[in-house]
Amino acid sequence: MAAVTIPQQRAEAAPPTSSTRRWAPAVTLAAAVTILLLALGTAPLDVAKYAAYLALGIVLPGTLLYRALRPNPHSLLEDLAYGAVVGLLGETVALVVLRDLGWLWPLAVVAAFAAVPGLRRHWRAPDYPNRPSPAWSWTVAGIAAAFLAYLTVAFMAVNPPVPVDGPQQYMIDQLNLLALAGDLKHHFPLTVPEQGDRLLPYHWFAYGHLAAGSLATGIDLPVLWFRLDLPALAVLAVVLLAVTGWRVARRAWAGPVAAALMFVVGEAVMPRQAPAFFGTITAYYTWSSRSLLYAAALTMPLIGTAVAVLRKEKGWLLVVLFAAGTTGAKSTVLPLAGAGIALVVAVHLMKKRPQRTPWLLGGAFAVVEVLAVTVLYGFESQGLSWGPFTIMLDFVGSQYTGTTLGDAPLIAWGLGAYAIAMGARLAGVLVPRRRFDDAELFLLGALLAGVLGSLTVWHVSWSQHFFIIAGWPFGAILSATGLVLLAERIPSAHSRRLATVVALAGAALLGGFAVAATVPQWPRWGVPVPTYAFGAATLAVAAGVGFGLRRLRHAGPYAALVVVLFAGVARLPYDAATNANLGEAYHVRVTPAQAAGARWLRDHSSPGEYVATNVHRVGSGEQARQSLAYWISAYSERRVLLGSWGYSPESTRMQSERHRLGPSTVYWDPARLAANDAAISSPSPERLAWLWERKVRWILVDRAQGTESPRLADLADRVWEREAVVIYRLRPVG
């Protein structure tokens, strides 16, 4: 432990408060979420059912199990938050083992903890050593509310669960991922959407969570996807980072600061002129990829329990459990945690003071990772390959050749801007400490591994960004700890409050400047110039604020750091206001007739009956040629023999081998594609029998992408038609 660390009991000296005041932030936040969902048109019964499912089917059994497994209590909020994650993992196991009877697992847990004498004590809350103050709780609730406001404007308010009043532009990934949830709802193991029985090695736990929720509650999957699930995960992720930051830093306010640095503050850029290669941590990714938010939720307890083990506080079973959970949530998390442990081991060896615990923990992580690579991912590379600085391909180098030594000056120029944009929120890492303890080395190692992964790996769909995103919670806690260390050096509480208010006002001023100002740019090499300009403005404001508060003892450095950490405060509001739903840059147009046809199939077919279709491409807009139209499987919850193929392992492998960006527009088995299409455009008994042998019982034709042969109506039964969408039922063969 670092010499400057204060005891847990001093971390938050909350005075006794009434239960009403204690629960007021949580109740207010829950009421706000409920009002939001109702305002978005969510059925009140669905809201009530899902709330009951989360409380009784996830949090209650998970909390009981967590209390039985954790070595020492920390706070009631941690029990509930970490318990919710244990509940999510229990839900996943039940989905695989029990399928439609998954609701039995919480009943079994509750019954066991009620009947077994040794387990009954876990119903009673212990004497917790830590209790959050009202100010702490209201701050965390405010951070969650701000994050929800962003998600609402950027995603939920502009995406109806099902298009009814007119065509809707859905971001392509959303329907593909909804199709994954639909497949897991009825089948296991998971297959590639719209590729028949082709197994999909993937981090599928987030989509299994949606499938399990739909099975248990009967709520429509699109309602869960576009309405109910995202706010629940968002609030859980914020609370988890807040309690984990508190536990790891042993300073209560490190938690809310870390949560703000991840879920409220964005990149330190001028949003209109930010280079694409920077990527983001929260903007876009938190709503476009549900697995990222789900993985963030699982990452927090992994960090907390790993640090507890490093501090010899026990909890080995929990850390292995959470490590296993992260592998199925997002493949990038556990390798970074392993890198963090490797740094701890390396420092011990350098100091010639090796310890057994980090070696054992690293070995446990390695075993879990090997099992995940074998079982979950089937040794698939997922299109990742070595590619130093290919994250910058829109700025330097070529997608065909990558980067070369000749690009070194431009790379260095771009890296400086990248450090400003992404590193401002991490500036607290640089606050001097007497020494880094094992917990801080672990956090630092994971963060550095995430940055290196993003900068040195190439992927066909820019997924190298996921490395730094996975490492961000580690860095946010470490940076927040540095800020709190500076705050503790200010002797007066009044001075701390004044410095905080002045510094946040300076950050708000920078936010206004970032949105309103523009900087001249020149081709290619001038792309990072606006970021350098914003970095200079940030340093100027930070220096001015720090100098202005010089008379307050130790307040100047603290206030200057607050300005730097929160300089990107305008990034998320700007994104929500100007780029909600990613505009229409990567979308598929779904009409009410298309959605209605797919949902009719869901209601009139069984999961074992497959669908054939002529829909292989988006068909309109900027992505017309892309094979990324997943609306049939997304809304029908049925497997399609051969629909779109852009997000299949074969497509990723082909593009990776050719070193091309984006999905493949060419199908790798032209004979199979021709046979599928011929059964629709030129049907015969033999061709329909070919479909029947492959479990196809239905044909969905979208005449906007080609009309079927008139003879199809003679060989199959036309059962549904609206506008350009027609559905046929195949007649039994033989």
Image (cartoon, rainbow, N blue to C red):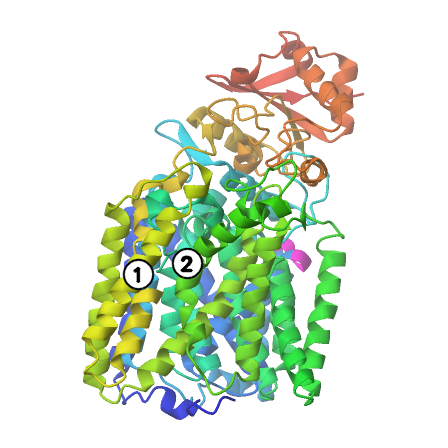
Q: Position of residue 183 (x, y in %)?
A: 62, 43
Residue situated in front as seen by the camera: 484 or 666: 484
Mark identifier at residue 307: none
Q: Which mark is residue 538?
A: 1
Name which residue lies at 67% across and 83% down: 350
**Number of marks in the rendered image:** 2
Q: Indicate whether residue 99 is drawn in magenta.
A: yes
Nearest the camera: 26 or 176?
176
Expressed as whole percent of the image width and height from the top left, the position of residue 198 reads 73, 39
Image spot of residue 18 (x, y percent): 25, 84
Magenta residues: mostly which secondary structure? helix
Q: 660 above or below 27?
A: above
Q: Which mark is residue 420?
A: 2
| Quarter of the image where the C terminus is located | top right
Please report the residue visible at 46 percent of the width from the left and 62 percent of the height from the top: 54
Residues at circles 2 and 1 in contact by the CB criterion of under 8 Å: yes
Q: CA distance from mark 2 to mark 1?
A: 10 Å
Please provide the residue range marked out in magenta: 96-100
